[in-house]
Amino acid sequence: MWGKPAASVIVTTRNEEKNIEHCLRSVRNQTVKNIEVILVDACSADRTVKVARKYINHLVVRKCGVAEGRNVGAKIARADVLVFLDADSMLLPETLEEILKAYKRRGVVGASCPVLPISADIRYVSVYMFYNSMARVSTILRKPQIAGMFCTYRRDAFEKVGGFSDDVGILEDFHLSMRIGKLGRVKFLTNTIALTSHRRLEKMGMRVPDRYLLAWLRLMLTGRSFSLKWYDKHMAR
């Protein structure tokens, strides 16, 4: 890669052998070509790293959680726009081009777009449609709540708020977008989408949105969500 990249895509993984190639291939198939790709792997026991190597510019292997892993990736990123993408998510070819256009507008510090499940099952689609509606309204109200499965921020804004918080519990992604939203506009585009796996919904059913809604209400009222121990205990039921 020559010169400064247009965007730095940061993906965190742990045993994502089945998903990582689809994710990274979608990044490399973007209409914007000068993209830096950083993989932060939490010591996977499968072939995640081996599969990913041909698609990435930088690899960090470190035993850490998602929030810390994203922060680690951000520290070595070279672009002014940081893109955080889950390993089981994918982008349409024009997604990053549209995202980068948003940053040309004055005062924009973050941008995302609707996320839909790969499955056409109406149960899963309805959950993501609810999230998309909530995310769009939240940005209009200037209280952005953007999920980490696909979110992007200006580097200077990300660094100013200290990145993802390790001590907020779950929904650290919503917490980050709310803090960054105080620095400027976070745009929610409607002319492109991202895709993501429905595996959590498939495995645990409607307990997932119910419990996330409870965690979201707590975050809104107290500024803190539930701990990871709470997540492990209640999501496993």
Image (cartoon, rainbow, N blue to C red):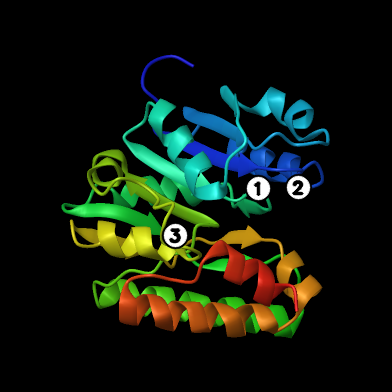
Callout 2–callout 1 Cβ contact below 8 Å: yes
Amino acid type assigned to the residue bearing label 1 in the image: Ala
Closer mark to the observer between disc 3 and disc 1: 3
In this view, 13 is above or below 150: above
User: How far is mark 2 from mark 1, CA to CA?
Assistant: 6 Å
What secondary structure is found at the residue carrying circle 1?
loop
Residue 217 screen position, x and y as percent = 42, 83
Q: Position of residue 53 (x, y in %)?
A: 70, 24
Where disc 2 sits, the SS reads: loop
Could you tell me the amino acid type at mark 3?
Answer: Asp
Q: Decide which of tag 3 and tag 1 comes sooner along the chain.
A: 1
Toward which corner of the image does residue 4 lie, by quadrant?
top left
Please say whether residue 31 is visible from this viewpoint.
no
Q: Measured along the vertical axis of the image, is residue 170 above or below residue 54?
A: below
The residue pinned by badge 2 equals 19
Q: Quadrant of residue 193?
A: bottom right
The span from disc 2 to disc 3 (Cα, nearest Å) is 21 Å
Q: Nearer the viewer, residue 29 or 202?
A: 202
User: Where is mark 3, residue-wise?
Assistant: 173
- Circles 2 and 3, Cβ within 8 Å, touching? The answer is no
